[in-house]
Image (cartoon, rainbow, N blue to C red):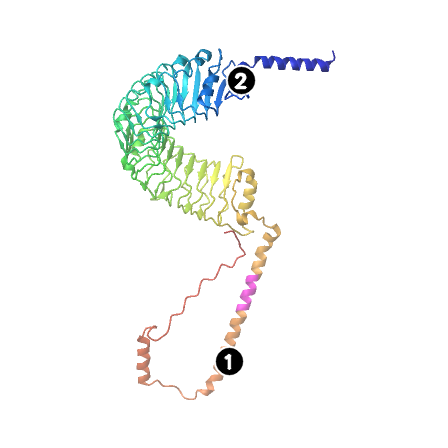
């Protein structure tokens, strides 16, 4: 046999071996055996390439058919080892008790995931999932039509369920015993429902729960015992409810809480204290008007705090004093408030801060009482000041460890030549300001090998070729110059000859103008001298002013210009600066 035919034989042998080893082949054959006459099936076996082998990557997807068709095909399975059954966009309406009765004998994977979504399910019969028993670890019923409450009978027998997701249904109330059978549950998702009431004790049986998400609902209040039993909870998400009344003692039971999101509510005050494990606290989009109403104390492991998009107007020296008990706080965000006043020493208790976000406020200066507001922040790496009203960056404004500065969309017209001295800047954004020039040496200490991004576009640059340096510096920055806006004259290279000739040309022009002015003045003097000599012979008699003339003169002098009908002359406008300047608006 020739080598060519040998290779073909090996290829065909491998192909046949692969096909015979395909775990989906018998499953799809079973679906076809019970399908309609045209051979189309609603369910299909698939292999997930991102998951490992040993049947962990085998799953069944059913879509676009009625409940009876899906039900019939799933019952055809025989000793099938699949990881996941995913049913979507089907017309199930009701999940009957016997739906997985026979399939449970075939679905042998010890950690089975069942997902039924976008299928208009409104009723789940009692014991529908019980036959899947200990093998079902994840149940997701998202985007269906389950109404009012969760039927506890439908969840019976799921002693080993670890994840339950009933998001995007029409649940309006969570009763005290609805979840009592799910003692091993680790994650519970109730997002995007219409929940307005949670009875005390609703979570009392869920001592193993780690994640609870109730976002995008209609909760108006939190009672003292709402979270009873959740002593092991680590993440709690309550974003986008109607929370206005909160018994803050309810959170004291959550001793292991690491993440708390209370954003997009109607909170006017905060009182959180003594959470040893809390690392991330989000209070965005509330109704906080004064930081004196925000009491955050003794959160020893707090790393991230965000109060964006509230109605805060100022930061007084004592407002952040409670954060002295959070020595690990590295990120503070107060973006999109109305902050215009920041007192000296306001940040003195935040010595560990590495990122400060103050964008979209009304801040006009970084210096108060001759001292930089940021001077206590010796470890600050990232400072975001975009969208404020800053007018200048001074030499002592920025902290020494800063490597990222976003000061775009301000009113900055002046930058001290030493504003960035001592900094190892990696990212600098000064676009959309009012800069006309930067002093030579401003960027002398910026290492182009370290610089990752700089944007100076959309300013009002004025360029004089003999003095211009910034355009050439940006060329050296290369790909780090990330600006997509207009650079104006900075983008137009100067002709070296033109730059060298400019001083001589201007000196000649100025000298010529002065010579012409001198000649005009001299001619004027000669003219006045001649006229004076010509008029003297005519005046043979000296003029004598009569008393009546003197009286008339005094009266005239005592009148105002307006009474005499004489309007004051307008003051001439200052002469424009006569330089050859290329403008970029």
Please tell me the numbered disc located at residue 32: 2
Q: Which residue lies furthest to the front in this view?
A: 37
Res. 152 visible in picture? yes
Q: Residue 192, image x and y in percent? A: 37, 30
Res. 400 visible in picture? no
Classify residue 186 by image quadrant.
top left
Q: Residue furthest right?
A: 2
- Circle 1 SS class: helix
Near-viewer residue (275 or 418): 275
Q: Residue 5, image x and y in percent? A: 72, 14
Residue drawn 55% across the image and 39% down it: 477
Badge 2: residue crowd in 10 Å (few <14, some 14–19, many ≥20)? many
Near-viewer residue (387 or 512): 387
Please tell me whether residue 127 is drawn above or below residue 444 in the rendered image.
above
Please tell me whether residue 113 is drawn above or below residue 242 in the rendered image.
above
* Number of numbered discs: 2
Residue drawn 45% across the image and 14% down it: 103
Q: Residue 161, image x and y in percent? A: 38, 17
From which residue to which does the magenta span run?
509-517
Please tell me whether residue 435 is drawn above or below residue 558 in the rendered image.
above
- Circle 2 SS class: helix
Residue on which disc 1 sits: 530
Badge 1: residue crowd in 10 Å (few <14, some 14–19, many ≥20)? few
Please say if the residues under marks 2 and 1 sit with CB atoms less than 8 Å apart: no
From the image, which quarter does the N terminus lie in?
Answer: top right
């Amino acid at each position: 046999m020739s080598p060519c035919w040998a290779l073909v034989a090996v290829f065909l042998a491998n192909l046949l071996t692969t096909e015979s080893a395909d775990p989906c082949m018998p499953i799809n054959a079973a679906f076809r055996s019970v399908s309609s006459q045209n051979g189309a099936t609603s369910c299909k076996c698939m292999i997930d390439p991102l998951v490992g082998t040993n049947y962990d990557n085998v799953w069944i997807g059913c879509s676009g058919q009625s409940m009876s068709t899906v039900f019939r095909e799933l019952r055809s399975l025989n000793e099938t080892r699949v990881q996941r059954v995913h049913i979507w966009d089907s017309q199930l309406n009701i999940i009957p008790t016997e739906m997985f009765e026979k399939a449970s004998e075939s679905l042998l994977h010890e950690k089975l995931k069942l997902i039924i979504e976008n299928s208009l399910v409104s009723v789940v019969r009692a014991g529908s999932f019980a036959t899947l028993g200990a093998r079902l670890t994840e149940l997701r019923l998202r985007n269906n039509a389950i109404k009012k409450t969760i039927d506890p009978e439908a969840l019976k027998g799921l002693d080993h369920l670890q994840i339950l997701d009933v998001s995007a249904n029409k649940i309006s109330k969570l009763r005290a015993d609805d979840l009592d059978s799910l003692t091993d549950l680790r994650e519970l998702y109730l997002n995007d429902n219409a929940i307005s009431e949670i009875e005390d004790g609703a979570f009392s049986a869920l001592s193993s729960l780690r994640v609870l998400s109730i976002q995008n609902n209609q909760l108006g209040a939190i009672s003292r015992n709402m979270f009873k039993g959740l002593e092991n909870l680590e993440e709690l998400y309550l974003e986008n409810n109607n929370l206005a009344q909160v018994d803050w003692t309810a959170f004291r039971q959550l001793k292991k809480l690491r993440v708390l999101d209370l954003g997009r509510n109607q909170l006017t005050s905060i009182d959180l204290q003594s959470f040893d494990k809390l690392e991330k606290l989000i209070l965005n989009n509330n109704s906080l008007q004064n930081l004196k109403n925000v009491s955050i104390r003794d959160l020893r492991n707090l790393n991230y705090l965000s109060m964006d998009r509230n109605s805060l107007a100022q930061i007084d020296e004592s407002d952040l004093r409670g954060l002295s008990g959070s020595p690990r706080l590295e990120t503070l965000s107060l973006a999109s408030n109305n902050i215009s006043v920041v007192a000296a020493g306001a940040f003195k208790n935040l010595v560990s801060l590495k990122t400060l976000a103050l964008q979209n406020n009304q801040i006009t200066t970084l210096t108060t009482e001759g001292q930089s507001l940021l001077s206590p922040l010796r470890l600050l790496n990232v400072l975001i000041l975009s969208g404020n009203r800053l007018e200048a960056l001074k030499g002592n404004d920025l902290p020494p460890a800063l490597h990222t500065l976003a000061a775009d969309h301000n009113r900055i017209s002046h930058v001290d030549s030493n504003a960035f001295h001592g900094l190892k800047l990696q990212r600098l954004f000064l676009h959309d300001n009012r800069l006309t020039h930067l002093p030579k040496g401003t960027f002398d200490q910026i290492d182009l090998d370290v610089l990752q991004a700089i944007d100076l576009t959309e300013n009002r640059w004025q360029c004089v070729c003999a003095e211009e340096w910034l355009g050439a510096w940006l060329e050296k920055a290369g790909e780090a110059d990330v600006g997509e806006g207009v650079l104006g004259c900075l983008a137009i290279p100067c002709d070296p000859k033109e730059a060298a000739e400019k001083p001589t040309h201007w000196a000649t022009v100025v000298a010529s103008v002065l010579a012409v002015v001198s000649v005009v003045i001299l001619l004027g003097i000669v003219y006045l001298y001649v006229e004076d000599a010509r008029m003297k012979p005519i005046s043979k008699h000296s003029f004598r002013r009569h008393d009546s003339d003197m009286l008339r003169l005094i009266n005239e002098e005592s009148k105002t210009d307006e009474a005499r009908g004489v309007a004051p002359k307008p003051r001439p406008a200052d002469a424009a600066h006569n330089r050859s300047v290329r403008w970029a608006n």
